[in-house]
Amino acid sequence: MPVDLTPFRKALQQGDRAAVRRFLDDGLTPATLAAAGLFPLHEAVWNGHAEVVADLLEAGFSLEARDHDGRTPLHFAHLPGHRDILILLLDRGADLHARNRHGETLLHLAARWGSDELVELLVARGADPSAVDLQGRTALAHASQANFPDIVRFLTPRTHLAWMPDHPRGPVASRRDAAALVRRAVQEGFPASLDDFIRQGVDLTTPDKEGRFLLHHAAQGRHPDILVRLLGTGPNLHCRDRNGGTPLHTAAAHGAVEAVRLLLLAGADPNLDNAQGDTPLHTAARGRHPEAVRLLLEARADPLRNNHQGKTPLQLAREVAVDVPAHLVEFGRPALNPGEQEANRRIIDLLTRAEQER
């Protein structure tokens, strides 16, 4: 007759040390429990009961035992608060590099769960940050995907993203994840991380799913220091996204004045058009960004250039109504606030003078 293991499992979950000992003294063995699909050491680690973990080790439960997912007890010590148990397991000889059936080490799991302290401890004890799982992902990739910036900053200089695994899917996955990590550093403004990637020789030319390159992301203007670093690598200033837009189009669309200035100083062409025939000047005029318009005109952007609709930047600016009738607002057309009205007026003045000077 099968033994009811529910009380034993409950004792493990509650950390009831005396009850666990009684069950073991009554004849429960590692082999019997494993045959029933129960791995007490795994559960005790997961539930954070250090004394029960120590008792189970003394009773002969193995650090090398694997559950149905290929996990050793160490794999369950990945949550914040598991530091003492992790140290106990490592001091007892647990394999720091053990992998589950997905090829993940404890470092991968700790990074994915945001366990900052454990990640640092594991690296200090010899865990390899450059180890990849069966999808070619490093612990750094897991931390980035799960949005743990402190772990990303810690692991970046310690992870060699240029190292590619040997298995067939690995190189593609690693290149993809490396590109995503670099993109994250650019978008979130991690200059030290970006510097590390550049030093490692990570590919900076991989576009995202929308065809946008790193320079497009940096041109949004949130982190000018990141844009300066990228410009220092000698990038293609005229790379195109899926809409045919250059980084200068992006900067103009966002009204990112410093990004516009930096790109123009680096030699970006202000008269290249996108798939709609819009130049950055059209884009800045439509977006009501007078300072971007001014910089582009000073860089000899053509104010008479027509887009594919036959419209100049000035015509686009004039189409942005300064005073929208109330009945149009009711139908969903937004009225401009006073600041937007003033910005639009300045753009019309700038473009009118520029056309007259031609």
Image: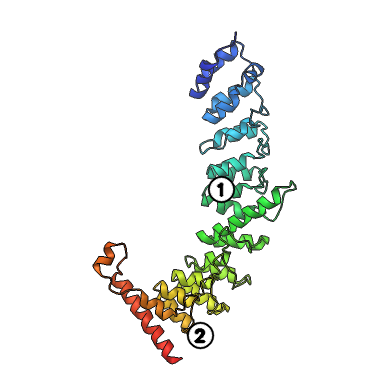
The answer to whether residue 290 is visible is no
- Where is residue 2 drawn, in percent x and y? 59, 11
Q: Residue 8 carries which label?
A: none
Residue 79 is at least partly visible in this image: yes
Mark 1 or mark 2: which comes first in sequence?
1
Nearer to me, 58 or 322:
322
Q: What residue type is labelled 1?
A: Ala
The x and y percentages for residue 47 are 52, 29
Give the image location of residue 258, x and y in percent. Answer: 47, 73
Tags 1 and 2 in contact by the CB under 8 Å rule?
no
Residue ID at (68%, 43%) = 134
- In the image, 305 versus 111, the foreground residue is 305
Q: Residue furthest bottom?
A: 357
> Which residue matches tag 1?
143
* Residue in view at x 56 percent, y 29 percent: 45
Which of label 1 and label 2 is nearer to you? 2
144 up-or-down from 351: above or below: above
Q: In this view, does 92 lie to the left or right of 286?
A: right
Q: Name the residue under label 2.
A: 300
